[in-house]
Image: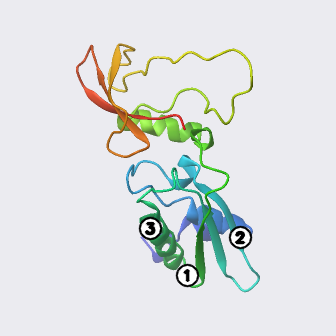
Amino acid sequence: MTAAMYISDFETRTLTPRQKAWDIAATVCDPEIPVLTIEDLGILRNVQVTETGKVTVTITPTYSGCPAMDAIRDDLKAAFAKEGYEDVEVNMVLAPAWTTDWMTEAGKAKLQEYGIAPPSGMSTAQRHAGPIRLTMAVKCPQCASLNTKELTRFGSTSCKALYVCQDCKEPFDYFKVL
């Protein structure tokens, strides 16, 4: 095998500088749920590249006190440094507030495969006036049973609740609809 066979995917495609920068940022994983990228979560909001090559990445935390944001900022800078970018700025914006509606369908599927029940339904931000929505049961990611029970509203992180399946008896995290 030659060294040419190890060329980065970013180098083999013809992309605009902004598309290339977006693709680099989109590879960064959430440190709390490593099967999800920040793009899967919907916290990657914008990427800009100036004519001088400065990259500005805008991210929105899942909630204002999210402790993972410092790690995500550092991981973004490292990902860009690995691809040769020296001038990278990461901005965190709180408005509009993040919602689970921003998660990709691929991200929700990755959560399910990882053993975390993905959010179901739409957040209140996306709902319109009208009929009252009923709260539905949370499906167990292990056995798909709807016979589940919330143990605590806050699980391993504030954006997840801890549930247990009454059928297979396995505890699991549920990524709350926000």
Residue identifier under label 3: 70
Secondary structure beneath dot 1 equals: loop
Q: In this rendering, which labeled residue sits more in front, label 2 or label 3?
A: 3
Secondary structure beneath dot 2 equals: strand
Q: Disc 2 and disc 3: Cα gap in Å?
A: 20 Å
Tell me which residue sits at (40%, 45%) in the image: 158
Query: Residue flagged by tag 1: what amino acid is it?
Result: Gly
Q: In this rendering, which labeled residue sits more in front, label 3 or label 1?
A: 3
Query: Residue flagged by tag 2: what amino acid is it?
Result: Gln
The picture places residue 118, in percent across and down from the top left corner, at 47, 33
Between 23 and 145, the residue placed more toward the observer is 145
How many C-alpha atoms fall within 10 Å of the one at disc 1: few (<14), some, or many (≥20)? few
Whether residue 173 can be seen here: yes
Q: Disc 3 and disc 1: Cα gap in Å?
A: 21 Å
Between 40 and 147, the residue placed more toward the observer is 147
Task: Verify CB contact (< 8 Å) between mark 3 and mark 1.
Answer: no
Give the vertical position of 30 relative to 153 (above or below): below
Residue reaching furthest to the left: 169
Tell me which residue sits at (49%, 61%) in the image: 28
Name the disc covering residue 84, or none. Answer: 1
Q: Is residue 141 left or right of residue 37?
A: left
Name the disc covering residue 48, or none. Answer: 2
Name the disc covering residue 134, or none. Answer: none
